Image: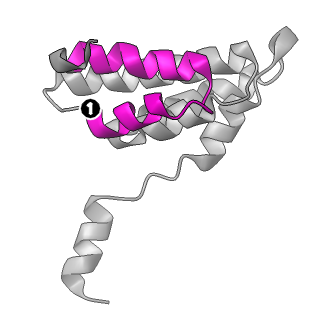
């Protein structure tokens, strides 16, 4: 392997959030999955803004309690990224909103943050 490629891979590790997102998606009524959700939530919130569309997609078809965990993770990342001067993935958020098969709560969340970071998005 090329040494410069190895350095890049080590500097920018791929964020595999699949397991953590599935753990958050499994949260249900009467506290089911909450104990496992806390460390999964911490793992997800370490991600950068590029993970936001995946988090929104994870809200499809979940129990409202699971959606709350995912929403909190999304907002934690988005807030942190904006505070440090980074940009949210505006094009991906716009595309997500237009895909009507996604959960309405997730689409609304994407819209709220899109409007917050892109003044031309209101309409």
Magenta segment boundaries in residue numbering: 89-117
Q: Residue furthest left?
A: 85
Query: Residue 36: x and y, percent?
Result: 72, 29
Specify whether residue 80 is in view: yes
- Image quadrant containing the N terminus: bottom left
Count of labels in the image: 1
Specify whether residue 48 is in view: no
Q: Residue at coordinates 73% horizontally, 29% vertically from top-left?
A: 61
Query: Residue 26: x and y, percent?
Result: 77, 30
Query: Residue 22: x and y, percent?
Result: 69, 40
Q: Main secondary structure of the magenta part?
A: helix
Examine the image and state in which quarter residue 6 appears. bottom left
Side of 68 where 11 appears, left or right: left
Query: Residue 50: x and y, percent?
Result: 35, 43
Q: Residue at coordinates 39% horizontally, 18% vertically from top-left?
A: 111
Q: Residue at coordinates 71% horizontally, 14% vertically from top-left?
A: 65
- Indicate whether 68 appears above or below 4: above
Residue 106 within the segment the image draws in magenta: yes
Q: Residue at coordinates 62% horizontally, 28% vertically from top-left?
A: 59
Residue 116 within the segment the image draws in magenta: yes
- Image quadrant containing the C terminus: top left
Residue closer to the observer: 118 or 71: 118
Residue closer to the observer: 22 or 105: 105
Which residue was labeled with disc 1?
88
């Amino acid at each position: 392997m090329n040494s410069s490629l190895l350095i890049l891979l080590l500097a920018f590790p791929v964020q595999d959030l699949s397991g953590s997102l599935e753990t958050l998606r499994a949260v249900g009524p009467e506290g089911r999955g909450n104990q496992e959700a806390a460390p999964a939530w911490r793992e997800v919130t370490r991600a950068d803004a590029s993970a936001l569309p995946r988090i929104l997609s994870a809200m499809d078809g979940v129990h409202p309690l699971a959606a709350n965990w995912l929403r909190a993770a999304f907002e934690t990342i988005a807030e942190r990224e904006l505070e440090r001067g980074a940009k949210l993935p505006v094009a991906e958020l716009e595309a997500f909103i237009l895909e009507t098969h996604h959960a309405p709560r997730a689409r609304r969340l994407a819209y709220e943050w899109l409007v917050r970071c892109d003044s031309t998005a209101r309409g």
